[in-house]
Image (tube, rainbow, N blue to C red):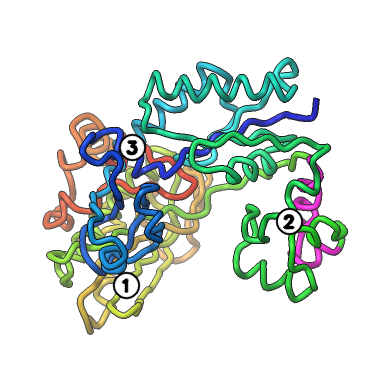
Amino acid sequence: MTLRVLYVDFNSYFASVEQQENPKLRGKPVAVVPVVADTTCCIAASYEAKRFGIKTGTRVADARRKCPGIIFVNGQHETYVAYHHRLIAAVDACAPVAKVHSIDEMAVELPTRWRSVQAAREVAERIKQSIRDRVGEHIKCSIGIGPNTFLAKTASDLRKPDGLTVIELKDLPQALHRLALRDLTGIGPNMERRLRARGITTVAALCKASAEGLRKAWGGVGGAILHAQLRGLEAVEEHREQITLSHSHVLPPHLRNDTDARAVAHRMLQKAAMRLRKNHLAAGGLRLSVRLPAHGRWSSETHFGATQDSGGLTQVLDTLWDQRTPASAPVAVGVTLIQLTTEDAASLPLFAAPLATAPPPIAQTVDGLNKRHGKSALYLGAARRAVGAAPMRIAFNRIPDVEVER
């Protein structure tokens, strides 16, 4: 019994949720976008849209050209998070979820009695039925089953949508040979170039490579980890401290001016500060970035004594923004809090006067009211023009906290 992990990957997740929510979208090409504007990109596409070559990252203007009948919908990230928790419950009702990897991926560690091929397949079918019964028949998932998380995830990618694939130890490495290097988790364009430079151009060659050879190609332990994963061993994950906290937003056309873009940046900064306080963190720096037309970009950052205070951070953002020379209308803005530390470990600077390290009582009161009544209950005036802007967004491997980020 070599099977240990069952991996659930929800297919075209955002678009599928939209089709589950709205019967009029079912069976039709749908693209989810941050804002309906020709210059923005699709963040998800239904399988009906994918047949026309539309995928994540396709520009809206190109999507219209490829599929004149495509339907664009603004992303409803709070809805996707709500469905995410319902789906966890649906899977967990059949088998305990061991780890949530992203908004649309989760893993189940199979107990000994479920590690035969037949038993594991039966669990997978029960999970699919539970999703249909508890969440909806238009939310499809592909399930992979394997000796470790890496191989189970790889198996889940082999048959989409609504697939079920098992990779056993006895199937290795031949079961992987038909894949391209980029089909494997952890191999992006840069790593592919490095592997090819060492003569590793196929997955078959990758599987034959030694642990030391892959370690050299990776420039570190990542290569040795992949060597073990390809052979069915489970990698031990290192705990990584959170080092940044960020928000970014593609501006709709009516906000693409200096005044409104600045207000949007302040709105995102206030959300980020609220996240800091909830997670008992403090920031020692702030980075501001502004994307301009034709892929131009401006950014600047500054450092200060660790703080959680929205008022102090607002002053810092204003200082950074005033450094800009507005040459053209902003297309997107982003704020990143850097040099994070736990609030009880924050050290004071030796010379410069720090910003307030601990949140004043008023900040705690504001946080409480916003959690209870929504993001627009109370806010600092710098964000007034953007109160309804910068809605919650879902990052690749982080599930937003609706209470704080909505």
Kindly identify which residue carries mark 1. Answer: 291
Kindly identify which residue carries mark 3. Answer: 17
Lower sequence index among marks 3 and 2: 3
Q: Main secondary structure of the magenta part?
A: helix
User: Residues in magenta?
Assistant: 213-232
Q: Is residue 87 left or right of residue 67?
A: right
Residue 314 picture quarter: bottom left
Q: Residues within 10 Å of mark 1 (few under 14, many from 20)?
A: many
Front residue of 265/380: it is 265
The number of discs equals 3
Question: Residue 220 location in percent, x, y?
Answer: 76, 61
Lower sequence index among marks 2 and 1: 2
Front residue of 251/20: it is 20
Q: Residues within 10 Å of mark 3 (few under 14, many from 20)?
A: many
Q: Nearer the viewer, mark 3 or mark 2?
A: 3
Q: Nearer the viewer, mark 1 or mark 3?
A: 3
Q: Is residue 50 left or right of residue 389?
A: right
Image position of 284 with respect to 196: above or below: above
At a point 16% along the width and 49% down the height, the residue shown is 388
Q: Is residue 1 left or right of residue 401?
A: right
At a point 12% along the width and 65% down the height, the residue shown is 254
Question: Residue 394 location in percent, x, y?
Answer: 38, 47
Q: Secondary structure at mark 2?
A: helix
The amino acid sitting under disc 1 is Arg
Q: Secondary structure at mark 3?
A: helix
Kindly identify which residue carries mark 2. Answer: 222
Lower sequence index among marks 1 and 3: 3
